Amino acid sequence: MRVLTVNVGRPKAVGYTDAPGGATGIDKQPVEGPVGVRDPGRKGTGASGLVGDSVCDLRHHGGSDQAVYVYAREDLDFWERELGRPLANGQFGENLTTSGLDLNGTKVGERWRVGADLVLEATSGRIPCRTFAGWLGEKGWVRRFTRQGVTGAYFRVLVPGEVRAGDPVEIVHRPDHEVTVALAFRAATTERELLPRLLAAGEALHTEELRSAREYAANLGRGTVGAGTVPGPASGTAAGPVSTTESAGTG
């Protein structure tokens, strides 16, 4: 279990984002040498957890609950076969591309030691949006990505440190509950009835997903649950409204 590449993005002006300034940092490129990782602070003011990585839309992206986005090389290989095109490390906007780790089976609250000092804690899956779709240039991408549910995982930073390509990853804590990243993703998108089950993850869950789960459970108890959207994490390093339509979210 290891980090294959550490990927950071620079601001790039594009026509497929509504971010202030019209730029996105979703184009993550592998870098050499160590990269500092720390808690960026609360959403709205905090950006990426990686030093030198750009987050261009602080309305939806960045912050402590989405400090680091991780995607498995094995899952990129799956999408290469599905899409019939090569996908480089960082192509999905991930900060860390890993090998030997089951990201979808990662539990919310699971903690990883990466390298010598860095400790990360899983918070949620990644929900796609139009920026992600625009970047890949794949028609129907939001719906297709959602249907497959191969999401990768967001992490918060518990202990700051440095990360570099080749660093080993050790799972140092695995919670005793059933809430995986994949389950959290399904609950936030296509299977809202699963939301109460996320409460077992407690405060480790992404703050906005935890709020949604609590509200849903409360409404369920009052008999007032209805249709609508649920707040949750969105593409890249984002969080925003969740829907399974192609108009979902912005990054």
Image (cartoon, grey):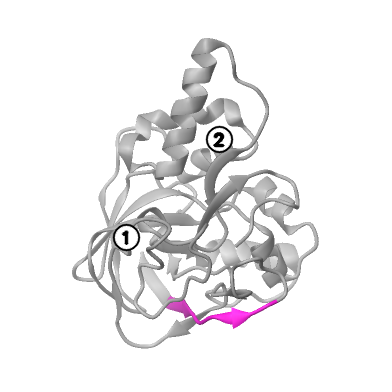
- Residue sitting nearer the eye, 197 or 47: 47
Q: Which residues are magenta?
A: 6-14
| Residue closest to the far front | 20
Give amino acid for label 2.
Ala
Q: Amino acid at mark 1?
A: Gly
**Outermost residue, right direction?**
139
Q: Which residue is mark 2?
A: 187
Residue picked out by circle 1: 41
Tell me: residue 45, above or below residue 121.
below
| Residue at the image position 44 percent from the left and 32 percent from the top | 198
Along the viewing direction, whichever of 141 and 107 lies nearer the viewer = 141
Q: Is residue 128 left or right of residue 134?
A: left
Residue occupying the point 40% across, 29% down: 199
Q: Pinpoint residue 32: horizontal percent, then vertical percent.
A: 38, 88
Position of residue 206 in the picture relative to residue 160 (left or right) = right
Closer to the camera in the image, 12 or 33: 12
CB-based contact (under 8 Å), mark 2 and mark 1: no
204 in relation to 14, above or below: above
Which secondary structure lies at badge 1?
loop
Quadrant where the image shows the N terminus: bottom left
